[in-house]
Image: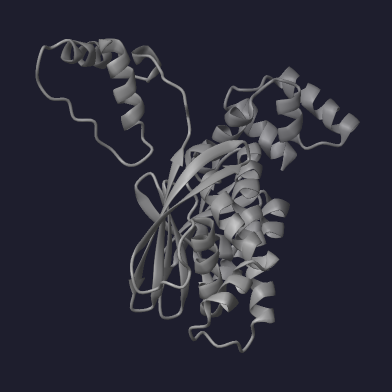
Amino acid sequence: MAEELLGLLVKEGLLSGQDAERVRLEQRRSGKGAKHAVVEMGILSEEQVAEAMARHLHLPYIELDHYIVERQSLEAVSERMARDHKMIPLYRLGRTIAVAVADPFNIYAVDEIQQRSGCDVLVVVTTESAVERAIDHYYRVTDSVREVIKTLSASREGAPVAEMEAAEEERMAQEPPVVRLVNLVMTQAIRDRASDVHLEPRRDALHVRYRIDGILHETLKIPKRLETAVITRVKILAGMDIAERRRPQDGHIELEREDTRLDMRVATFPTTHGEQVVMRLLYRGGVIYGMTELGFEPEMLAQFERALNQPHGLLLSTGPTGCGKTTTLYAALDTVN
């Protein structure tokens, strides 16, 4: 693979014959692969190498840091396999699963995914560092949540889902595994920069969904027997009446996670399958930008500023939650002032 990679880099005009020989000498000295040697020697960037491999193999190249992974697709690849093969699944569509890989020459890993998932594999190329960041981001909390759910499920095996006394609900909600489970769900929402968290009780389980850039993504299912404990834990944090289950309630939680401070507006309302909870995350940015710092193209900025200087009229600031509507309006008001 090393010689094949060096050959295609030379063919692409990204590497001279002299540089290729230098890379071979460095490989023999350090024992590192050609891709790592090229990057560490400062000859090419990770992106240049990845894009060259994608062109050579006629595969798409993506900037993984700008991509939101569909969490359900993570079930097709374990964290160990993802780390060993430097890959991460992106999404599942029918009988096809898309996988981002740092080493598109590793056909054995692709075959393994195909056998395990029973799906056709669509390969896209990205950088190794981007894959590692994505694995850290998506697998660590998700696997921790599943581990807690497994522990709780084992301890509650056979327990009834029927309504219980408020005191018993509160006791369950204060148990360390339940506290950790709710904390992990909130931590993942912050990492994903979600605007809302939905806890939706259904016939089979409690479904957890995050709204990211205006789109709801289902992340995991909490077993039905744990539903009451999880909902009660959230209600306790929000200062709600845990004994009241038949009327909507509103509450508020202040959180600080991973150097991020935010407020959560919490609303519950009864459904046929139990209490549904919606949590709106409000990030405390505390930063006011000037008009030139918002990312406007020069022509658009000039049009916007002309509109601000009009004595009357109407400006619409629209878009999904978290896209910057309020930040833009504050910058506009600061300009007017």
The residue most toward the right is 29
Q: Nearer the viewer, residue 153 or 214?
A: 153
Residue 145 at least partly seen: no
Residue 272 at least partly seen: yes
The residue most toward the left is 312
Which x, y percent locates residue 37? 76, 29
Q: Nearer the viewer, residue 266 or 44?
A: 266
Where residue 149 sits, quadrant-wise, is bottom right
The residue at 60%/87% (across/down) is: 159
Q: How many marks?
A: 0
Q: Decide: is 193 above or below 241.
A: above
Which x, y percent locates residue 131? 62, 44
The residue at 60%/56% (across/down) is: 183
The residue at 48%/38% (across/down) is: 66
Which x, y percent locates residue 304? 22, 16
Position of the C terminus, as image quadrant, is top left
Q: Nearer the viewer, residue 214 or 272?
A: 272
Q: Nearer the viewer, residue 280 or 129?
A: 280
Q: Decide: is 212 above or below 36.
A: below
Which x, y percent locates residue 222? 53, 71
Where residue 130 sits, quadrant-wise, is top right
Q: How is the image coloured?
A: one colour
Position of the N terminus, as image quadrant, is top right
Residue 219 shown left or right of residue 47 in the figure:
left
